[in-house]
Amino acid sequence: MPKCDHCLLEFPEKDTVRAEIKGSSRIFCCNGCAGIYRFINEEGLDRFYNERKWEDTGQVFPLLNNEIDIKPFEDMVRDVEKDGLKEIDVFIDGIRCASCVWLNEKILGRTEGVEYARLNYATHKARIHWDPLKTTLEEILKRILYIGYKPKPYSESEQFIARKAETQDLLIRFGTAAFLASQLMIFSAALYAGYFQGIDRNIQKLLEVIAMLLTIPAVFYSGAPFFAGALRGLKNFSFNMDFLIATGAGSAFFYSVYQMFAGREVYFDTAVMIITLILLGRYIEALAKGKASQTIERLSELTPKEARLIKDGSGDAVLTAVASIKKGDLILIKPGERIPLDGVVKTGESEVDEAVLTGESKPVGKTMGAVVIGGTMNLLGSLTVEVSKTSNETVLAGIIRAVEDAQAKKPRIQNLADVVVGYFVPVIIIISLATAFYYFSTGRPAHFAIMTGISVIVIACPCSLGLATPLAVMVFTLRASAKGILIKGGEVIENLAWVNHVVFDKTGTITQGKPQLKDVLVFDGAMQREDCVSLASSLEALSEHSIGRAVCDADNSLKRLEVSAFKALPGEGVEGVIEGRKIYIGNRRLMIQSGVSEHELEICNERVSFFEAQGDTVIFMSWEQKLRSAFVVSDMVRPEATSAIDELKRMGLEISMVSGDNAKTTSAIAEIVGIKNALPEVYPVGKQDFLEAIHLNGKKTAMIGDGINDAPALTAASVGVSMGRGTDIAMESADAVLVRNDLNLIPYFINLSRSAYSIIKQNLFWAFFYNIVAIPLAVAGVLHPIVAAGAMAASSLFVVFNSLRIRK
């Protein structure tokens, strides 16, 4: 009978599966074996078949036989905005250290069709982009499964359930190991006393057997995750942190068993204490990660699972799963209930508590036409809301995604640590073997040589290197989000820490962005005030600019006219056709471009300059090359603007303000808040050029803005910060968003970044310094394996507790 080329099992010839692999014809007992054989060869791991030593046939990797149900994942696939790619978030079970992250990212990165793969160590969430023309989701998930990790559909609940289960499992394993270690120490103390002072041989044997029996569950139950992780790494020819721990504890145990039968000194206590101390470090680390992730957990719990869906026709409200509600559906929110989804109020009046998202302590009034945010609390009256965003599109969902993405994106300073972690474990194994061999060859006792080699393995700590940046980034992003600062990437820490020049936009940033129409100046004798406002509000209704909204909101009773050929002109104004007339609304520069003479503008200046000197903004309206009217818009300076700018000055930062407004208005606002360097009448591209000129002088900039005209500058700045009430384009261009429109958050944000960056550097210094000092000491035979295990656990705990200082 033929024999399977993979599992070596003999099988009937009629069941033969043939496959052409690397130019050779192969036979297999089933398609599963054929698939595994092909996968191992394609990954360049075919030497496995030359080196394996199977005593029995029919052995396969257990996880490689598992099928994966693709259906739960299909609804989670999203379209990526560019290049026709698909995107999914997957929870990967079995992630234990930085090496696990590295292995999964490498295997996914080598998958044809996968364009992007980033695994978040903090949440175990992998975000994957792939080309559906080149590969399938099922193929990608099987790649994860083949290397010994289990992909699951990602959800916040899945993440938190897994984290709690992991923490509980670590506690049980640590408690078991600690209890057995305490009992073992009693017998070990008696054995050590006997070695020095003499002991009856039968009593010694009894004590050694008891010690061995106490050690077995401590090492092979409590330490089971380390051995499983080590085996998983070996199957993929990848050495990880678990391999070092399993090798150290396993060597101490099996060497002690050998010593026991040889009648020599045993070291069972060493094996148990290695496992116990490492588990203690892992448990404390898991608790710290759990505490650091509480912000995401609290946010994810804000959205109700059900909503009162109003049925068409009957008007009855029926409890329906939020996941099944679509855009355009009407939902009823009663007093005291959380708003399930983003939407617009259709009927009803109430007040809504938005503090959890915006930090605004006062309830916000909501009437017909007002926008409500999912996750906020309805306080007083009932509201009927038309859903505008589904559960994955809400502001709250965006905040959670942004925080998780920020944790996954690594600062540049982490690159060095990533490179070191990749080579660390193999190098340590080589050093350990070389150390043991050296002491053997120089005539030192075997137990000394082996224990010294174990010390080298146990004391090495790539985990501190792997944790140094991700944990600090996680704490930083969650602390920032708790204050109302939404961060889009971990690299913001490094960039903002080096900022020495802060540039502010004026309208909507230094000012409140809630301008009101103060006066209307009519220059055309044939026009009435109402006519001018009606034309202007019809055109500005299509604009996102806050000044335009002020004109729109001036009088809602006026008739809105039909507009065609509308165009927003960033930094200048708007244009459009109403009743056959091409109308321009904007600043002086736009008026001149529209054909208005400079002489005509100078004549109007006498009436306009009075308002501009008070800090008001004046925009003009023209058509047919004639100036028809001007609108005086007043926008109050934010009450906290002066104190925020004073604090930035005390921090040693240079401050500038750029605005598309005229010189008089810009100067007046700058004088109120204490900014000396204010640039008026700056185009959007001009703002970008201004920032680039600062960069040429070696400075790092932070740009604070809110409008479409700020988007180029926000992108060009070292760090772009958008106001939370800003336009979608501005928020997309920015690196961070102030969910709560409070300028005092800017100095706080910079100080938080400086503190986090300093702590990351401390963590990396400690991780490198610890390994550089500790490994030579272990090689010299100065450190006992128990001391080495304690030192290794202490190294990781230093990084954990140092990172948690960011919260304070």
Image: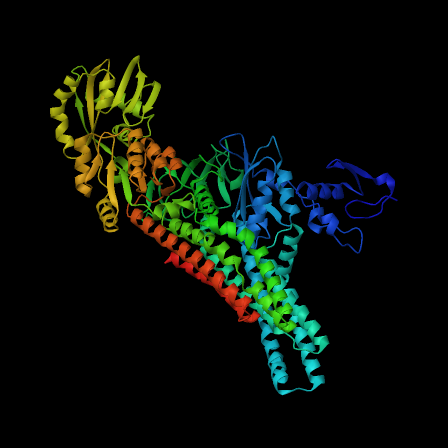
Image spot of residue 9 (x, y percent): 82, 48
The quadrant of the rendering that contains the N terminus is top right
Between 424 and 685, which is closer to the camera in this rendering? 424
Q: Residue furthest front?
A: 442
284 above or below 707?
below
Residue displayed at 65% across by 77% down: 265
Q: Is residue 186 left or right of residue 791?
A: right
In the picture, residue 179 is in which quadrant?
A: bottom right
Q: Residue furthest right?
A: 1
Between 470 and 586, which is closer to the camera in this rendering? 470
Q: Is residue 327 left or right of residue 751?
A: right
In the picture, residue 664 is in which quadrant?
A: top left
Image spot of residue 761 (x, y percent): 40, 55
User: Does the image show residue 792?
Assistant: no
User: Does the image show residue 255?
Assistant: yes
Image spot of residue 362 (x, y percent): 31, 48
Q: Is residue 312 left or right of residue 492?
A: right
740 above or below 598?
below
The quadrant of the rendering that contains the C terminus is bottom left
In the picture, residue 384 is in which quadrant?
A: top left
How many marks are shown on the rendered structure? 0
Check the image and tell me how it is coloured.
rainbow
Image spot of residue 289 (x, y percent): 48, 56
Residue displayed at 56% across by 54% down: 162
